[in-house]
Image: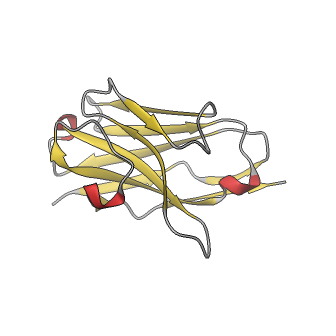
Amino acid sequence: QVQLVESGGGLVQAGGSLRLSCAASGRTFSQYAMAWFRQAPGKEREFVAAISWSGGTVNYADSVKGRCTVSRDNAKNTVYLRINSLKPEDSAVYYCAVQRLPRSTGTSRSDDYDYWGQGTQVTVSS
């Protein structure tokens, strides 16, 4: 059974930084692309960042490009998302997800991911 557990969310002032973590189990983590999505109240879930199975390819949403770094440590079965220069509009529940097919590059389409974590809340105060 695949499990994804996010952590690292919290309340932070605008301009600050956070590093989110997602610990994975139940699948050969190193063989699968991972992604981060977020959902704010009243809004649809949106793509934030993705990283390929090898870590060699990363993909960011325009809204976070230049402020965000996605990385992975396959030895720890963990993927990370660091967001700098946080803005109030970054406030959302952040979810990590594992891509359905092995050895993928990491896409921005939520339908390409078959397991999701429970989410971690990020709140940015102005």
Q: Is residue 69 above or below residue 101?
A: above
Front position in the image: 70 or 5: 70
| Position of residue 44 in the picture relative to residue 108 (left or right) | right
- Residue 64 in picture, x, y percent from top left: 60, 41
Counting every numbered tag in the picture gives 0
Please indicate, yes or no, whether residue 113 appears anywhere in the rendered image: no
- Residue 115 in picture, x, y percent from top left: 26, 60
The residue positioned farthest toward the right in the image shown: 126
| Position of residue 52 in the picture relative to residue 27 (left or right) | right
| Position of residue 118 in the picture relative to residue 75 (left or right) | right
Task: Give the residue drawn at x 54%, y 48%.
Answer: 8
Task: Give the residue drawn at x 28%, y 38%.
Answer: 77
Please indicate, yes or no, whether residue 69 appears anywhere in the rendered image: yes
Rendered image quadrant of residue 51: top left
Front position in the image: 75 or 28: 28
Front position in the image: 46 or 71: 46
User: Which quarter shows the N terminus?
Assistant: bottom left
Task: Give the residue drawn at x 58%, y 52%.
Answer: 9
User: Which quarter shows the C terminus?
Assistant: bottom right
| Position of residue 47 in the picture relative to residue 32 (left or right) | right
- Residue 46 in picture, x, y percent from top left: 50, 58
Question: What color scheme is it?
Answer: secondary structure
- Residue 99 in picture, x, y percent from top left: 25, 49
Q: Is residue 57 above or below residue 7?
A: above
The residue positioned farthest toward the top in the image shown: 56
The residue positioned farthest toward the bottom in the image shown: 42
